[in-house]
Image: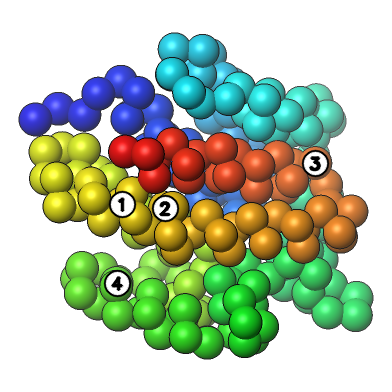
Amino acid sequence: MSISHSKLFLLNVMELCVSVFRGPDEHAWAELATHGVPELLDRVQEIPGFPADPLSALDEALAPYAEAENFSPLEAEYVRLFIAGPGGVPAPLYESCHGPEGRTMGRSALAMRDRLAEAGLEISLPSNEPPDHLTLELEFLFHLCAEGWSGDPEFADQAARFAGEVMLPWVGRFRDALAQADPDPVFSAGADLILALLPVVAEG
């Protein structure tokens, strides 16, 4: 069973968001700015229920860097926001940090580790990265959606629950933390794009 045009679009959005929040290098940023984001923006009007605003905002935010042919400020901003900002990390990329425990390797990390193991998936980040990293959860969601939308309703149900019950609440809190750190618009638009994606997936 082939995946529909609209579902392929959603999978492409997941891949785009993984790239943004994994911290691409200069070449990858350039590819996103000149090809990845504009191509999705061209297609978004054909996708029922998916807002164009986050993609438009991401496109506009990347434009000055593309025009200058210099994406190095985004690499520095990525470090400030997500790895080692002055006075602490304002918006950690881990689910555990935005839950009741407020620290890495909490219960949500252990739950994510179990989900990945049950699915037979390997972590594609450095071995010391907690498994509830935002990009790993997006890649897991991609896996569930790709299997489910190819014709396995059990995977489709898992994808909808994971998007709506696991990811959507904490990504909302992550977006709030990010907003308080005066982020580059590239990253706020990226977070908004995830928050546009997750309800659509949750609705099936």
Residue at point 76% right, 26% down? 60
Residue at point 72% right, 48% down? 187
Residue on which the image places disc 3: 185
**Foreground pick, 37 / 179:** 179
- Determine contact: label 2, label 1, CB under 8 Å: yes
Residue on which the image places disc 2: 163
**Foreground pick, 189 / 32:** 189
Residue 70 visible in image: yes
Question: Reading the chain from its start, which is encountered first: label 1 or label 3?
Answer: 1
Residue 28 visible in image: no
Q: Is residue 179 left or right of residue 41?
A: right
Q: How far, Cα to Cα, is label 2 from label 1?
A: 6 Å
Question: Reading the chain from its start, which is encountered first: label 4 or label 1?
Answer: 4
Q: Crowdedness of circle 2 by 10 Å Cα count: few (<14), some, many (20+)? A: many
Residue on which the image places disc 4: 116
Q: Quadrant of residue 152?
A: top left
Question: Reading the chain from its start, which is encountered first: label 3 or label 2?
Answer: 2
Q: Quadrant of residue 15?
A: top left
SS class of the residue under badge 1? helix
Q: How far, Cα to Cα, is label 4 from label 1?
A: 13 Å
Where is residue 29? Give x, y as percent.
Answer: 64, 41
